Image (tube, rainbow, N blue to C red):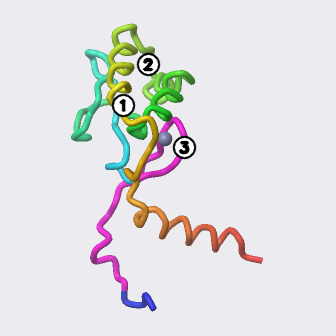
Amino acid sequence: MSRHVKGQRQKHVPKRTCIACRQVAGKRGLVRLVHTEEGVRIDPSGKLPGRGAYVHPNQECWRAALDGNRIQQALRTKLSAADRQFLDEYMSDLPVQNDTLVVRGEIESEDAASQVEGRTP
Ligand SMILES: [Zn+2]
């Protein structure tokens, strides 16, 4: 059926892991945080230099990342009060739950494949 699907449409899609829920998503489905000299910043362009971490743009993951100090671990830094406030404010603008931000097709093909492999009798 899908014999000649040769990845013409499937460009290389960088995958990242949400530090809160550990789900892998395409880079665009996650928000990048970067630890810069001025503190933690949101990096929509993905181009800021520095240690980055990825979180789903929803309050659930955001809160989990903040509460569990996962952001600090991932960025290997301590969040200052200003950083926290900044992240809290950012979170308040996010949707509460992850909607359809994850582009399913990109992930499912790989997941399905690895499941089949893992279940080899
Ligand atoms: Zn997440």
Binning the other alpha carbons within 10 Å of mark 2 as few (below 14), some (14 to 19) or many (20 upward) gives some
Mark 1 element type: loop
Q: Is mark 3 within 8 Å of ligand 1?
A: yes
Query: Which quadrant holds the N terminus?
Result: bottom left
Asked whether the beta carbons under mark 2 and mark 1 sit within 8 Å of each other, the answer is yes
> Which quarter of the figure has residue 88?
top left
Image location (x, y in percent) of residue 96: 44, 35
Q: Report the Cα–Cα distance between label 1 and label 3.
A: 18 Å
At label 3, which amino acid type do we have?
A: Arg
Q: Which residue has dot 3 on it?
A: 22
The mark that comes first in sequence, 2 or 1, is 1
The mark that comes first in sequence, 2 or 3, is 3
**Position of residue 17 in the picture relative to residue 42 (left or right):** right
Image location (x, y in percent) of residue 99: 42, 48
Q: Residue at x 26, y 32 (%)?
A: 49
- Give the residues in magenta: 5-25
Q: Residue at x 40, y 15 (%)?
A: 84
Q: Residue at x 43, y 19 (%)?
A: 77
At label 1, which amino acid type do we have?
A: Arg
Binning the other alpha carbons within 10 Å of mark 3 as few (below 14), some (14 to 19) or many (20 upward) gives few
Q: Residue at x 56, y 70 (%)?
A: 112
Which residue is more in the foreground, 101 or 51?
A: 101
Q: Which residue has dot 2 on it?
A: 77
The mark that comes first in sequence, 1 or 3, is 3
